[in-house]
Image: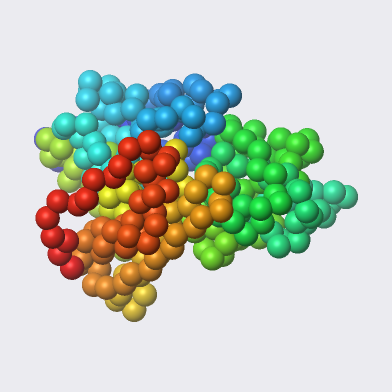
């Protein structure tokens, strides 16, 4: 090991099973890169972890699952922070940046039916009975599902994956919707009844990807962790986040975007919906991956002109200002 390098790195992370899996995964990757490096996890409780009895949309604000971890970075109590990318705001405190986006797991949503006599009670989303109770805390998911099936009863579901599955098994819901990535990472893929097509539920921005945040001026750390960056995932997630940034999105409004690289072309699908699901605006764009973030901005502008602006203005209680300057493509 280079004598100028640190011998110990502290990873700031949330304390949920999934967050710890992600932090351990990053830890293992770093240990492979640098023999003799000691890495410790620092579990930090965030605002989003503390407020479990209120829907996130009503809590308001951005960074509910990262703010306290960012404070630890700024105060030197952690060297890097490991996040689920779908939780990371598009703006960072001065001195911090998104240094790495790791390889993505399946970004889609999982439909998980209740089980009766060892069998799924419902074989797929389309087979749900009229008035079925669906558990999800995501406005993005509920908007899209209600748009397809306005008869469904969407009920709030908060807590970690263990808690959510337990509530399903206790009979509180007919089915729940979770991220495929989290279910697979914790070894519960056998509980997945159906992986929802993006046409039914377009994924959350950054879903399935793990990000690493660090101090901008920590050259040693940035050099080390840069080796964990996955270029294809990074391009796609940054394109999705450009959509989110332009739409000024948070958990208060249903916004989705999904980018993929296909034969050297980046394709991006985006969506904005009303909370009740009665209005859904969709758009698609594709182009050169080198212009991924500009394409994401273009997609967001398309959504705004197609009717998303009215939806967002209603939700935010104010008008979204026009974009300054030209968008290069």
Q: Is residue 131 left or right of residue 242?
A: right
Q: Is residue 9 left or right of residue 182?
A: left
Using the image as rendered, state which of residue 75 and residue 281 is in the foreground. Answer: 281
Using the image as rendered, state which of residue 279 and residue 137 is in the foreground. Answer: 279
- Quadrant of the frame with the C terminus: bottom left
The scheme the figure's colours follow is rainbow
Relative to 65, residue 328 above or below: below
Q: How many marks?
A: 0
Residue at 20% across, 52% down: 323
Residue at 39% across, 57% down: 307
- Quadrant of the frame with the N terminus: top left
Q: Is residue 86 left or right of residue 182?
A: left
Residue at 58% across, 32% down: 159
Relative to 205, residue 328 above or below: below
Residue 85: % across, % down: 38, 45
Residue 220: % across, % down: 15, 39
Using the image as rendered, state which of residue 15 and residue 316 is in the foreground. Answer: 316
Relative to 328, residue 59 above or below: above
Residue at 51% across, 23% down: 51
Instruction: Single out the residue that lies furthest toward the bottom.
Output: 263
* Quadrant in the rendering for residue 250: top left
Residue 273: % across, % down: 48, 52
Can the viewer see residue 46 in this picture? yes
Can the viewer see residue 228 in this picture? no
Residue 188: % across, % down: 64, 48
Using the image as rendered, state which of residue 218 and residue 56 is in the foreground. Answer: 56
* Quadrant in the rendering for residue 96: top left
């Amino acid at each position: 090991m280079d004598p100028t390098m640190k011998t110990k790195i502290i990873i700031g992370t949330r304390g949920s099973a999934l967050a710890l899996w992600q932090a351990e995964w990053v830890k293992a990757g770093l240990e492979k890169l640098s023999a003799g490096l000691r890495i410790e996890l620092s579990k930090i409780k965030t605002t989003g972890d503390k407020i479990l009895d209120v829907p996130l949309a009503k809590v308001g604000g951005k960074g509910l699952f990262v703010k306290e971890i960012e404070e630890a970075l700024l105060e030197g109590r952690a060297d890097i922070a490991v996040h689920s990318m779908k939780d990371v705001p598009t703006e960072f405190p001065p001195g911090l940046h998104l240094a790495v986006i790791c390889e993505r797991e399946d970004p889609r949503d999982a439909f998980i039916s209740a089980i009766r006599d060892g069998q799924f009670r419902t074989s797929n989303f389309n087979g749900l009975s009229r008035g079925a109770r669906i558990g999800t805390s995501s406005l993005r998911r509920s908007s899209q599902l209600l748009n397809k099936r306005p008869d469904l009863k969407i009920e709030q579901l908060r807590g970690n994956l263990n808690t959510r599955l337990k509530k399903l098994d206790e009979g509180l819901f007919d089915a729940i919707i979770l991220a495929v990535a989290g279910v697979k990472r914790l070894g519960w893929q056998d509980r997945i009844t159906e992986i929802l097509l993006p046409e039914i539920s377009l994924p959350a921005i950054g879903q399935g990807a793990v990000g690493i945040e660090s101090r901008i001026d920590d050259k040693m750390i940035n050099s080390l962790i840069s080796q964990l960056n996955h270029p294809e995932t990074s391009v796609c997630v940054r394109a999705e986040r450009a959509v989110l940034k332009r739409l000024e999105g948070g958990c208060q409004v249903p916004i989705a975007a999904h980018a993929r690289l296909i034969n050297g072309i980046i394709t991006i699908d985006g969506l904005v919906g009303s909370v009740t699901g009665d209005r859904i605006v969709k758009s698609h764009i594709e182009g050169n991956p080198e212009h991924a973030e500009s394409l994401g901005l273009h997609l967001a502008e398309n959504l705004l002109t197609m009717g998303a602006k009215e939806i967002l203005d209603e939700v935010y209680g104010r008008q979204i200002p026009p974009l300054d300057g030209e968008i290069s493509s």
